[in-house]
Image (cartoon, rainbow, N blue to C red):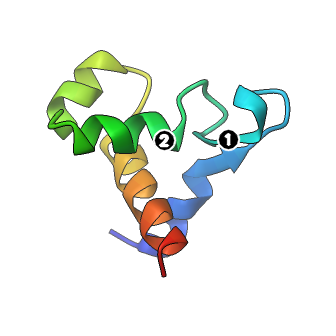
């Protein structure tokens, strides 16, 4: 997996979720995914709960969060 391309999956749109970072223009925020993972939800459960996202989107959220804490 090439991490350089993962961050392309995260976008910010002033018309969607008040400028929060989101996955590929969907109404699913990075925050939602990170909080779910922190709460014990598995990647497989997230993919079931949000069928419009892909495993790479979840990895992109994790990478985005890791970049913020550098």
Picture disc at residue 31: 2
1 and 2 marks in contact (CB < 8 Å): yes
Q: Would you say 46 lies left or right of 24 here?
A: left
Relative side of 10 to 50, left or right: right
Q: Residue at x 53, y 69 (%)?
A: 68
The residue where tag 1 is placed is 20
Task: Name the residue located 50 percent from the left edge and 62 percent from the top edge.
Answer: 64
Q: Quadrant of residue 35?
A: top left
Task: Write down the quadrant of residue 60 in the picture.
Answer: bottom left
Q: Secondary structure at mark 1?
A: loop
In this view, 59 is above or below 32: below
- Residue 37: image x %, image y %? 25, 42
In the picture shown, does residue 10 fall above or below 46? Answer: below
Residue 54 visible in this rendered orientation of the protein: no
- Lateral position of residue 61 relative to residue 5, left or right: left
Residue 5: x, y in percent?
Answer: 53, 66
Q: Nearer the viewer, residue 4 or 12?
A: 12
- The relative height of residue 2 versus residue 27 in the rendered view (above or below) is below
Structural distance between the alpha carbons of marks 1 and 2: 8 Å
Does residue 64 sit above or below 49 in this rendering?
A: below
Residue depicted at x 50% and y 43%? 30
Q: Is residue 66 visible to us here?
A: yes
């Amino acid at each position: 997996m090439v991490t350089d391309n993962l961050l392309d999956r995260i976008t910010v749109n002033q018309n969607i979720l008040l400028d929060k970072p989101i996955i590929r223009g969907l109404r699913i925020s990075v925050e939602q995914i990170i909080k779910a993972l922190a709460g014990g939800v598995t990647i497989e459960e997230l993919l079931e709960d949000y069928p419009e996202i892909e495993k790479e989107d979840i990895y992109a959220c994790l990478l985005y969060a890791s970049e913020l804490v550098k």
